[in-house]
Image: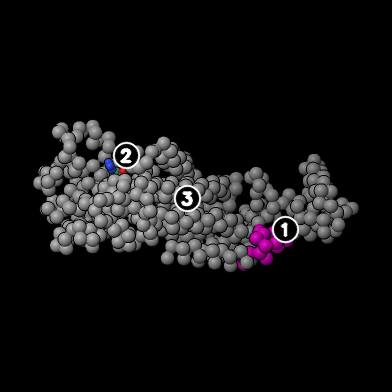
Amino acid sequence: MSEKEVASGAALWHGRFEASPAEELMAYTESLSFDKRLWADDIVGSKAHVSMLVSVGIMNESDGKTVLAALDEVGTEFASGAFVYEATDEDIHTAIERRVTQIAGEPGARIHTGRSRNDQVATAVRLWCKREVAVLASFVLNLVNTLEDRALEADSCTPPTRLPGYTHVQHAQPVLLSHHLRAHSWALLRDVDRLADTLQRLDVSPLGAGALAGSSLPLDPSHSAASMGFGGTFANSLDAVSDRDFIAEILFDIALLGVHLSRIGEEWVLWTSAEFGFAVLDDAYATGSSMLPQKKNADIAELARGKSGRLIGNLTGLLVMLKGLPLAYNRDLQEDKEPLFDSVDQVRRALIALTGMIKTARFETENMIAGADAEALVATDLAEWLVERGMPFREAHGVVGKIVRDSIATNTPMATLVLSHPLLGGDAVSLFDAGVAVGRRQTPGGAGPVASPEQRARLVEAIRQAKARFE
Ligand code: ARG
């Protein structure tokens, strides 16, 4: 196909066809509507390819210069919004090649030498992922930093803010608010670590694999890999064009991150309810009701919970799409991009919104403390007090269980029953004093104020290390 035909708007692969593509075919098979956003990455990949062609003498210097200048011009058109698509542009890759050829003429028609869209698209997507995964990690770290700011603030109250810790959503033992918030930070830091692992594995250039088998021309894939800043070059051309493991990994990382955000979201829905009353959202981060004038809803938290479903769906959809594919490229693989873009977009928005919500919310510390100081949360401390005096734990558990039962049955405060209990008495009653129970949790990694500084130090170091993995 001549550059004239390209300029006249026929499909790039039209040479062996007599008829033009049906409108329905184009409508069904196009990917331009969603892969447009790869334009900058396609141009980076195309420039690396052209430079490589010049370096091995397949393209002469003058043609190389002309094509590189045309690619820059196309980049400027995209950046300014001036780029005009044509009906025959199937995807961003054909659109750019078509436009480069219109601008550069005959040298432009040499750009696809030794290249297929199969290695071209894999290259552009990997470049996109390298950038976006790093951006995502920075937003996770912003959230972690916000949680840690709030944790530090909670610890600097006198006394440090405590709240009930739960198991089965039932009052269990008191914990510091800082400890609770940091539990989420540790999970999020593992998410960052996973993104860094994924980034390391995806940092391999597939350019030079061609359609599936490399080339009869003397290409130098390591040249283009180095000029794009990839850490490595493919070893097997079939694998290079058909591997989408890196997308599956990103989608898993995001699905799990999304599940962590969903769990945070669910907690904030509870905490901001009248029943819990542990937090009040800033007006700017809450929504109202169209009918109920009194409502102040935690919609960010709810959507963080709700959207986790589609993040899991995107991963599942990709894996199912991949599972039956023989080597090498199959058009099915085009289905990798929408879930990828959707998951990255959605989780980025969730991170930003949740960070703002948590940064600006007010903690209702009096309600938290009242909950933390409820008598039932002292039960384990009473049992452990008996253990410290030599009683086997199972027996102590029974003694305190009986006190709880009697307290409920006779509507008598536990403290009254403890005071008159032959094995407990006045010393044990002091366990009910405000803040005593949480203060007794002194074990490493435990929920009390003694362990808190050590945990903070570890967390600050973990944040530093996580950040460093992306520098
Ligand atoms: N739009 C396609 C994709 O995203 C580009 C590759 C098409 N390759 C081909 N041989 N038809 O996968």
Element at badge 1?
Answer: helix
Give the camera-side residue of 383 and 250. Answer: 250
Which residue is painted at 67% across and 59% down in the image?
446
Q: Are marks 3 and 1 in contact (CB under 8 Å)?
A: no
Quarter of the picture holding the C terminus:
bottom left
Give the CA separation, mark 3 to mark 1.
38 Å
- The residue stretch that appears in magenta: 434-453
Residue type beneath disc 3 = Asp
Give the mark nearer the N terminus: 1 vs 2. Answer: 2
Give the mark nearer the N terminus: 2 vs 3. Answer: 3
Is 169 positioned to the left or the right of 235 in the image? right
Q: Say whether mark 2 is within 8 Å of ligand 1.
A: yes
Residue 470 disc label: none
Using the rendered image of the protein, determine whether residue 302 is visible from the camera's viewpoint.
no
Magenta stretch, overall SS: loop
Q: Are marks 2 and 3 in contact (CB under 8 Å)?
A: no
Percent from the top left, x then y, of residue 177? 60, 58
Percent from the top left, x then y, of residue 430? 79, 59
- Disc 2 marks which residue? 331
Is 362 positioned to the left or the right of 24 in the image? right
For the residue carrying disc 1, how many other residues have a C-alpha within 10 Å: few (<14), some (14-19), or many (20+)?
A: many
Q: Does the magenta segment cover residue 223?
A: no
Give the CA separation, mark 2 to mark 3.
25 Å
Name the residue at the left extreme: 4
Element at badge 3?
Answer: helix
Percent from the top left, x then y, of residue 466? 49, 62
